[in-house]
Amino acid sequence: MSEAGDRRDCFGRDGELAEISAALVGPGAVGVVVEGDTGVGKTSLIETVHAERGGRDLWVRGDRVLAESPFGAFGLAVDLADDEGTLLNRVVTLLTAGEEAPVVFVDDAHHLDDASVSVLSQLATDGEIRIAVTVQPGLDGRSPHFRELVADGLLRHVLLGPLHEDDVTAMLEHHLGGVVSRGVIDATMFLTTGVPVRVLELLRYARQWDRFRLRHGVWLLDRLDIAYDERVRDVISYHLARYSEEQRSALELVVLAGEVEVGLMLGAGYGEAADDLVAAGVIGLESRGSPVYVALESHSTETIRVTVPVGRSRRMFELVESAPGAPSQRSRMLRADWGLSCGARISLRDSIEAARIAIALGEWHRALRILRGVPFEAMDSQELFDLGRLYCDVNLVPVGLDILAKAVRSAQAPFLVLEAFIVWIFRDVGRESPSLSVDDFLTALDRIEDAADGDGDVLAQIDLARVTLERVSRLTWARLSGDDVVDARWLSAEGVSETLRASIAIAFATKELERGRGEDVLALLEETESTMTTVGTPLIMLDCFRTWAMLQAGRREEVKLGLGEVRSQDLAFLAASSGPRDLVLARILGQEGRWAESAGRAAAAVEAFEYWNQQQFMAFALAQAEYSAMMSGNAEAADDFDARFVRLPVANVYLEGGRARGLRLVARAVLTGEQSYLDALDGVLAEAEADHEIALAMRLRLELLRHFGLYDAEAILSLAAVAGERDRRRFGALGAALRDEEPEALMTVADDLDAIGPDLAERCRDIAESWRAEPPTHTQRAQEQAVELTNRERQISRLIVAGLSNAEIAEELGVAVRTVEGHTYRMYRKLGITSRSEVAEALSRLRAEWPA
């Protein structure tokens, strides 16, 4: 046999290895059958066990050619051409030689001849030998060999399926080195279905063609040009040998057409073969007016589509097209793509319609293939917008913006102009595109207004578009404020496109999540998603916010289960959704206290967002990565992420901007120990409380408690009082325990906090233990700390006393008016006052306590 196997190569198979080893030595069994499809690792497992036993046991391998001869598998050790009368005895002698009840390993036993199976079964039954055999199931899902011995309990049965996603991830990271992004994981799971041999083939392919890109220690999917799916056939070529010629033809016909009516399949002579495929779960059978066979998309379907010879493919296409029927949208899309690939004539209108179906289904690369030969002149403004957005979705942004410019110049609908603006504002972060500027959108709206002839509905849409363009285009570090940017009534208005509807929902979701209204946000997003018909970037963003709302509502396990569902297996879509999925995972792992893993996921999110030009997520992703790195003890990585954070463009729309600033300042304060970061954090907290952003303010107060032992019990109680039911109970108990300085109550709270932050719970236990060790000498400590003003608040208070307005103070200090308002609100609450006229008197009471 070969060299000793390495258990590290048997990812996720520790239990199976132990079971195989035990079956070869313990009582109650005479061996084991290891069953599974090609590539699941049967051979690797028994090779490892064989090596661990010393590598001296007899090893036999079944072979399809040798199976034509009796005892053919033993031909290397026994002369099959010698006296046939003694052949059986010589085989038995070979198998039973050596120690009592020797162990015989038989790989690919499904290729053994009947005589070999019989002698192995009989010797094992008589206790003369033990056997470890690998078999592959047939098309019916069962292996005919050694079935009786398994049923009688003489042989253990180890059934190998595909690897779990966690094991595939470990396998990828072992072979690649570094962190593997969700895009790579999702693509690998789809293309290989978790079969180890296919994973290794994909890795070899990825290295050869540079399909996985390494950026700052993270592996990402590449830019995915439109020939990618075609090249992937080198990796996932499907083994069709188990199918008969009729079954293979039936499978190809259904996969190419998407669906085929039963009558047509019967007429082609493939009816019985198709029924066999249905029974095996390879294709489906549905009733759509009349019964139809339908393709079940898997790792192999695209391979089949690009490997059927063109001549046979063309004949099958003509057969399907000549038959009457009303195929589904998906089938129409597949047939257009099929016809173009085999040289059939497909009209421009059919091509455009098929491409728009592909865009709606999230099959971005297929849409690009179909549209390859369609001239822009054949498209109207909506179709041009769809194509431009598609190019932006697959990260071919310059091309996409050029096409969007054509759509804007020919648009007749205000909302189409606004949709294009939304795509542009997110994709052209530096406003550097020569194709588009804010003036182009305003000019388009002026042109539409001139042609509106006083139509009230059109003019209302133009007003909304103008307001949105004006406000969004001048935002800096925006928290896409639903209160400030758009009117929620447009969510239910007729004529509002999906992109615009999703953008309005996201604007409100951002604000409402900061206010702690996760359940309300969830209802809004689920209602919005229910009306979406296109799988694209807006839906990716909605999914991201929906999961954040679920986390805020305490539905973490549901979120984790939902991450296993992917809306599209298009490789570009997987790459585009990689960052949001990794960011959600980083938050979940952080809540569970698994900070090293959280840091890896957050780093993967950062690199995916930057590579895929999804700048709207970058602020929060960098802040989360910096925070997770700090929590995992990697100060160097945290510093690197911070350096990238401060280089972010100021004029941009950032999702979760307030939370991003807060997390970043916490990490800086912890790592540097500088008071200036705590002062700045106090300013963010003041803004959050002034704007009634309950969830954000509570998060920042918990961070101050967690890392610095600083707390304002009354402020925590005030925030808890207006929070949702779960947070009202949890944080109300925390505030009360801190206010009353009751160690037992705080210990009870800590047990509850373990679910959302083990390190926060540990801080509470430390405080409670300190109270037990040295009971507090006064009960107002926390409240007294709360009236200490920050340096910035002292500056502002003095300027208020000097008679300056908020705008004048902002100009004097070089900050935004909103920042001054936030500090003022916080200062008023600390001083127990409600107006500017009371500031001077309140300051005089505190002046003696201020340091010189």
Image (cartoon, rainbow, N blue to C red):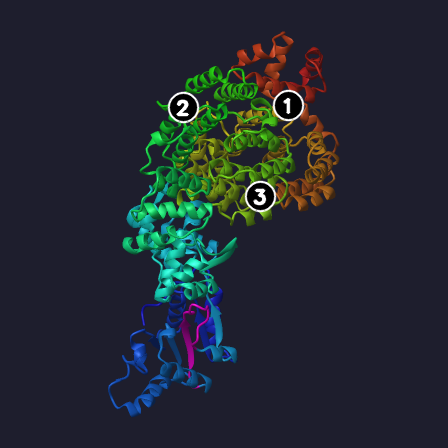
Q: Which class describes the residues within 10 Å of circle 1: few (<14), some (14-19), or many (20+)?
A: some
Closer to the camera: disc 2 or disc 3? 2
Quadrant housing residue 553: top right
Q: Residue furthest bottom?
A: 85
**Where is 646 relative to 828, above or below?**
below
Name the quarter where the N terminus is drawn.
bottom left
Q: Nearer the viewer, residue 528 or 215?
A: 528
Q: Mark 2 falls on what kind of element? A: helix
| Residue 760, position as x, y percentages in the image | 61, 41
Residues shaded magenta: 128-145
- Identity, as a three-letter code, of the amino acid under mark 3: Gln
| Residue 743, position as x, y percentages in the image | 72, 42
Is the Cβ of the residue at disc 2 closer than 8 Å to that at disc 1? no
Q: Which mark is residue 690?
A: 1
Q: Residue at x 49, y 21 (%)?
A: 469
Q: In the rendered image, is residue 180 in sight? A: no
- Identity, as a three-letter code, of the amino acid under mark 2: Ser
Left or right: residue 625 compared with residue 802: left
Q: Residue at x 58, y 22 (%)?
A: 484
Which residue is the site of mark 2? 410
Quadrant housing residue 481: top right
Closer to the camera: disc 2 or disc 1? 2
Q: How much space separates mark 1 and mark 3, taking CA atoms?
A: 27 Å
Left or right: residue 71 compared with residue 21: left
Is the Cβ of the residue at disc 2 closer than 8 Å to that at disc 3? no
Q: How much space separates mark 2 and mark 1, taking CA atoms?
A: 44 Å
Q: Residue furthest top?
A: 803
Q: Which class describes the residues within 10 Å of circle 2: few (<14), some (14-19), or many (20+)?
A: some
| Residue 488, position as x, y percentages in the image | 60, 27
Q: Is residue 144 magenta?
A: yes
Q: Which mark is residue 591?
A: 3
Q: Mark 3 falls on what kind of element? A: helix
